[in-house]
């Protein structure tokens, strides 16, 4: 694997981009079906958990998912994790304006953050797991998710993914997703996005992650939505 961006480099990039990421129209324009998946995940969580209480949002950014979830279930006890303090501050400001429940901020890497076992009803992980690196890193993260969820809890993921077959990956990612990015601006913009994905990210396939959820103990795993190289899915703990 080529040398990837450090956590400090990723943190610095997001520190400078709080305003853009506070708006799905600007912060997630490179992400296919960003608004659709946010609405789908948040409404689905509200349907599955009519008595929802404790939510963990890792890589929370400016809190878009939490603000949306509060449209369906409120008040909530929300724990926010992000590398960027400005992102955390903006998320807290937005959430506290509409939520009377407690908001806890955890600045840093979710992999090393200290959470008690069986603490959360729901974990939200959107556009964050692609920063994981080798297979052991992925397995350790999924094991931690399982450990800190309450019985009956679940993790909801929306992220960039790869295809298992290299030729299919070239078609889906380089051609089709590349065409989408060119449509947003131009070829230079496409190349800019591809360059920072290559530098920062190391995504895995949807199949890899679904299998890993089952391997680490999640007993019900479902796909919510897939469009080219982006997918949303969920795993439930017994």
Image (cartoon, rainbow, N blue to C red):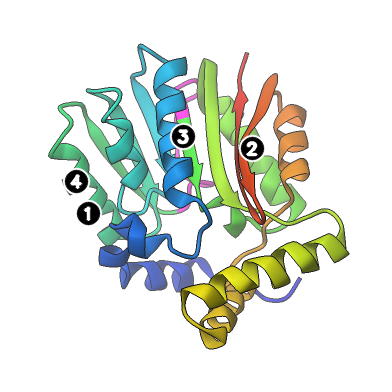
What residue sits right under mark 3 in the picture?
A: 40
Q: Residue 128: horizontal and vertical position, in percent?
A: 52, 52
Looking at the rendered image, the disc whose residue lies closer to the viewer, 4 or 2, is 4
Mark 4 and mark 3: span between their CA atoms?
A: 21 Å
Q: On the image, which quarter does residue 235 sit in? A: top right
What residue sits right under mark 4 in the picture?
A: 94
Q: Which residue is drawn at 47% across and 52% down?
A: 109
Image quadrant where one finds the C terminus: top right
The region drawn magenta spans 109-122
For the residues labelled 4 and 1, say whether their Cβ atoms are less than 8 Å apart. yes
Q: Which mark is residue 119?
A: none
Q: Is residue 167 above or below residue 78?
A: below
Identify the secondary structure beneath mark 2: helix
Looking at the rendered image, the disc whose residue lies closer to the viewer, 2 or 3, is 3
First reached walking from the N terminus: tag 1 or tag 2: 1
Q: 157 or 188: which is nearer to us?
A: 188
Q: On the image, which quarter does residue 18 sit in? A: bottom left
């Amino acid at each position: 694997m080529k040398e990837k961006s450090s956590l400090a480099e990723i943190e610095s990039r997001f520190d400078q981009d709080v305003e853009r990421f506070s708006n799905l129209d600007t912060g997630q324009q490179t992400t296919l079906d960003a608004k659709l998946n946010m609405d789908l995940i948040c409404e689905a969580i509200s349907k599955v958990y009519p008595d929802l209480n404790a939510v963990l949002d890792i890589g929370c950014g400016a809190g878009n998912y939490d603000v949306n979830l509060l449209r369906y279930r409120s008040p909530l006890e929300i724990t926010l994790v992000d590398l960027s303090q400005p992102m955390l501050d903006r998320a807290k400001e937005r959430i506290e304006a509409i939520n009377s429940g407690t908001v806890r901020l955890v600045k840093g890497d979710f992999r090393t953050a200290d959470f008690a076992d069986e603490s959360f009803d729901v974990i939200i992980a959107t556009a964050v797991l692609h920063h994981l690196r080798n297979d052991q890193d992925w397995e350790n993260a999924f094991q931690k998710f399982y450990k800190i969820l309450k019985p009956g809890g679940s993790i909801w993921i929306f992220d960039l993914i790869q295809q298992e077959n290299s030729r299919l990956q070239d078609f889906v990612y380089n051609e089709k997703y590349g065409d989408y990015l060119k449509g947003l601006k131009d070829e230079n913009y496409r190349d800019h996005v591809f360059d920072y994905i290559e530098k920062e990210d190391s995504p895995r396939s949807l199949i890899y992650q679904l299998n890993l959820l089952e391997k680490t103990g999640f007993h019900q795993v479902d796909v919510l939505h897939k469009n080219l190289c982006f997918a949303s899915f969920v795993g439930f703990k017994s």
